[in-house]
Amino acid sequence: MPVFNGAAYIGAAIESLCQQTRPPVQIVVVDDGSTDDSAARALAAGKELVTLIRQPNRGYHAARNAGLAAAQGDVIHYFDADDIAPPHALEAMIGALSANPGWDAVFGCWRNFWIDALAAERDADANRHLVGVQRGLVLMAALFRRTLLDRMPPFPESGGWAEGPLWTAELVRSGANLGRIGDVVLERRIHHDNDSRKKTLDGLIDLAFKLRKASRASTTKTDGAANS
């Protein structure tokens, strides 16, 4: 769980993990140079479950890489410090992996919820598609076998928010066996400071360009392998 000045929400995020019907054995919190009391609130909420790592501010992808290095479990759940896990989330995903030993990872569904101050944004016609159960390959709505993550490259630390979707695209191209379940395993908080509200048109164009470039590189590599 990366956090940078996330004191407002991190306590609720960790409490939702501690209150799972199948609780985690460890919650790795990476304090990415926070200047507020994020770390103290994380420790207060998670107590002995929390492994706290402190590092200078390097971005949340660097924090995710540091968290994975410190994680001890055979399955890994990436989670953000401003989100909420429904009580059955881990049980549903662990059960799916146990029932499907050939799956390298399992992805569930998620729901967005807006803070009260952004109720008008939630109700706007342009955002109707963001209300209700959402489906797709979202990093925080997934559970990964450690063996898969050990085969994957780390998250790129030099880029911004677009590097997360690019890493997921690389995951798909890797040929990993990705399962899906219909359970809602993530309640995603929409507030003033999260990245989903800061994506500019230029950023979206840059992501599209990077995905297209990566796709072409993957196709070239595949064609070369087929011809050898």
Image: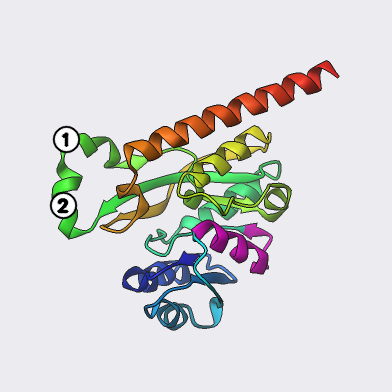
Is disc 2 placed on a helix, strand or loop? helix
> Gap in Å between the C-alphas at discs 1 and 2?
12 Å
Circle 1: element type: helix
Q: Say above or below: 72 vs 205.
A: below
Residue holding disc 2: 119
Pick whichever of labels 1 and 2 is earlier in the sequence: 2
Range covered by the magenta-colored residues: 60-75
Going by the numbered disc 2, the residue's amino acid type is Ala
How far across and down, in percent of the image, does residue 142 sit? 53, 49
The amino acid type, in three-letter code, at marker 1 is Asp
Closer-to-camera residue (129/182):
129
Residue that protrudes farthest toward the top in the picture: 227
CA neighbours of label 2 inside 10 A, class few (<14), some (14 to 19), many (20+): few
Closest to the observer, 214 or 95: 214
Residue shown at 55% from the left, 82% from the top: 48
Please name the residue shown 20% across and 46% down the image.
122
